Amino acid sequence: MTQLVDRHCSAVNQSAGQSWHPELGQIAHRCGLQLTLNRTAIDADYVPAAQSRQSTNIINLARDAQTRVDNLCVLTQQIQVRYQDLLSAAASQHPAQHIRLEILTINAAFEASPVAPFPIAECLRVVFEDRHTGAWCSGPVGLSFSSYIRDYDFNILLPQLSLQQNPQALDGFGRLHGLLYRLMFRSIWSGGVLDQPCLFALSVSSRRQYQGQAEQHPILGRRYRELGSTSLTSRYFAAMGLSASHFMPPGAMAPLTFYHEADQLLNQTSQDLAALTAVMESLQRIYRPEIYAADLAAGDHFAPSLSNTHFTPAAVHYDRQERDRQLGPEQAARAWECFLKPHATSLQRLVNAAQSP
């Protein structure tokens, strides 16, 4: 196992500081990469798939059959209320729409390999449904982003790299993950499965500090700036071609961190931004209540803390210890055994070929 971990480290680190080859799609095709997409509606009949990443926010809430329906009902009601509140705060017209959610699962395999397709990533998609006519239209895609490979990178690969006590060992961290992410889009190659750029909104880091800025957005709220050097998480998302912005929406207790392409975030419609924010803030109130359900809102200088005791407990309970200490390592091991290890040669070939000359 160590030898193959070292091979994966080598493939990732060799790509550090280099751009991807302009003919990335052709390279992926020649390497035999095959992607497929599954869509799963989050409704009263939703049951997580056996292969789904169990620590993914919504999937985690639906793991227990006894509490699944109640948990999802509470969440969807909170999302709908927050969505309307954000549009009201921005003086936007209230559309007669109901927000529905879907899980998009991206599966990867290699041609001629006997290994079954593996769900390398899952994200959410908003669907706006007209309450009166039943007509629907697609909203933002992404929202949260979960990845078995990210579990492997942070639980197995990162400790391996850290043992080298060489700062340059981390230069290429996340490059393989970033390459596979880019290949998910049809704009990159015909084998992609996603039609529009993704927008993600995650919790701010409890290890960082943030400074409020003068800039205000009607939906996103007040902009914050992350202090200090670029975080490892931001560098990881940068390998996916994404930049980080921090905003605290009107009525929120803390800013969210938005990951997006270039100027993509501020070019969205009010409805899309309100839906994105409503979904992810509602989830963070469950998973990070110390920050997002705090009694006091973030001020000019904000140092988020999971040790904060002055907050409103979430109506939906989950086991943070299990999620962080058990599920993460288990998912990392699964990514290794079911995808990275059996496809080590193909992945090495893909990364090497994708580097620009």
Image (spheres, rainbow, N blue to C red):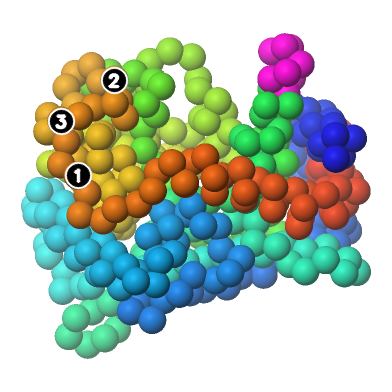
Q: Residue 310 carries which label?
A: 3
Q: Label for residue 313?
A: 1
Q: Is residue 34 visible?
A: no
Which callout, 1 or 2, points to the residue nearer the camera? 1
Rendered-image quadrant of the N terminus:
top right
Quadrant of the image occupied by residue 101: bottom left
In the image, the segment drawn in magenta is 161-169
Q: What element carries label 2?
A: loop
Q: Assess whether mark 2 and mark 1 are in contact (beta carbons under 8 angstroms).
A: no
Q: In this view, does 181 lie to the left or right of 281?
A: right
Distance CA(mark 2)–CA(mark 3):
14 Å
Mark 3 → mark 1, Cα distance in angstroms: 9 Å
Q: Which residue is drawn at 44% across and 64% down?
A: 63
Q: How crowded is mark 1: few (under 14 residues within 10 Å), some or many (20 or more)?
A: some
Quadrant position of residue 134: bottom left
Q: What residue type is labelled 2?
A: Ala
Q: Is mark 3 on a helix, strand or loop?
A: loop
Relative to 110, is 198 on the left or the right?
A: left
Q: Is residue 168 magenta?
A: yes
Residue carrying label 2: 303
Percent position (x, y) of residue 76?
A: 25, 65
| Kind of residue indicated by mark 3 | His
- The residue positioned 19% from the left and 40% from the top of the image is 293
Q: Residue furthest bottom?
A: 133
The quadrant of the rendering that contains the C terminus is top right
